[in-house]
Structures are given as C-alpha cells and as structure tokens.
Amino acid sequence: MLITENQTDFSTRKQWTWRGYQIQYSVTGTGKPLVLIHGFGASIGHWKKNIPEWANAGYQVFAIDLLGFGASDKPDLAYSLELWEELLRDFYQELVQKPAIFIGNSIGALLALMLTTNSPRNCDRRDFTQCRRWSKSSS
C-alpha cells in the first residue's frame, strides 16, 4: 500500500494504490469512523460541506473517489458494482479497520448496502441518501 498526501481546504487528500490503480480518498477528524461513498458521476467534492461538520461532531470521516471517478484512476475496464464493492471492502480492511458508519448517495447508497450486507462485521450503521431536484410540483 502506497499513500501520498496533499492538503485541501476541507480535508487531507491521499492516494492509495489498489490493484495497481491510484485511488484518491480523504480522511478528516478523529473518533468513530464514518465512510462516505459518492453517487454516480460524483466525487469526494460531493461531500465538501458535510465532511467538516461530521469531523467537528467527533467522527473520523473517510471519503473515497471510486475507481473511474474524481481524481482516482480511470482505467479502460469493465466497471461493475462488484468491482466497486471489492474496492470498498479492501479500503475498509486496509485503512478504516474498525466498525464504521457507511453513508452513501445514489449508487454509493447501493454500494454501502451491498458492502454492509455482505460484510456485516465492518458495519456499525448504514445510512442512505438520495437527492432529487426540488420543484413547486414536488412540494
């Protein structure tokens, strides 16, 4: 495992090598681990307003750019839910290493459900979010 760091305005961004690919993640704060999994087409930046709030509330907040998204490598391969689940399982085992709260948005919520269902001892709690566009007709 190779890890490099750079500081941003809301967290420390790091690079983790997974199966030869560079995966960007951030870790901020101390306390109970909380793992954030972004939605399809998003990245760590999706959580930029949440990360400092959760860190200030006493959590060690991990956020990851899934393979193919954000600042992580984008290799030409067959992406699948199972591939991302394996990535998240290895991320948890190598970097988080204690029961965590998993929070996912959109496809990240599905991945959190898959990971915590298939590896329940990794999970302290799971929360799922789905944002939708608000309009007068939806109120």
Image: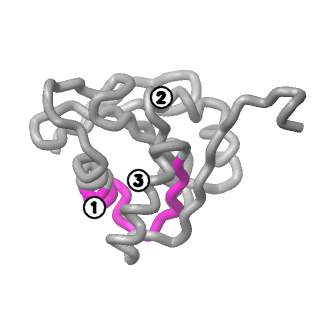
Q: What residue is pinned by disc 3?
A: 111
Amino acid residing under circle 2: Ala
- Mark 3 is on which residue type? Leu
Residue 96 counted in the magenta span:
yes
Q: Is residue 77 visible?
A: yes
- Mark 1 nearby-residue class (10 Å; few <14, some 14–19, many ≥20): few
- The quarter in which the C terminus is drawn is top right
Q: Is residue 60 above or below residue 126?
A: above
Residue placed most toward the observer, 102 or 139 = 139
Q: Is residue 19 above or below residue 4?
A: below
Q: Report helix, strand or loop for mark 3.
A: helix
Q: Is residue 52 left or right of residue 30?
A: right
Q: Which mark is residue 137?
A: none
Q: Is residue 52 above or below residue 69?
A: below
Tell me where the magenta segment starts and ends, as one range. 89-104
On the image, the x and y values in percent for residue 120 come to 39, 75
Please name which of the two marks, 1 or 2, marks the residue nearer to the observer.
2
3D distance between C-alphas at marks 1 and 3: 16 Å
Residue at x-position 50% and y-position 51%: 109
Name the quadrant of the N terminus. top left
**In the displayed structure image, the side of residue 69 where residue 26 appears, left or right:** right
Q: Amino acid at mark 1?
A: Gln
Instruction: Tell me: residue 51, above or below residue 133.
Output: below
Residue 26 in picture, x, y percent from top left: 43, 37
On the image, numbered disc 2 is attached to which residue?
A: 42
Whether residue 91 can be seen here: no
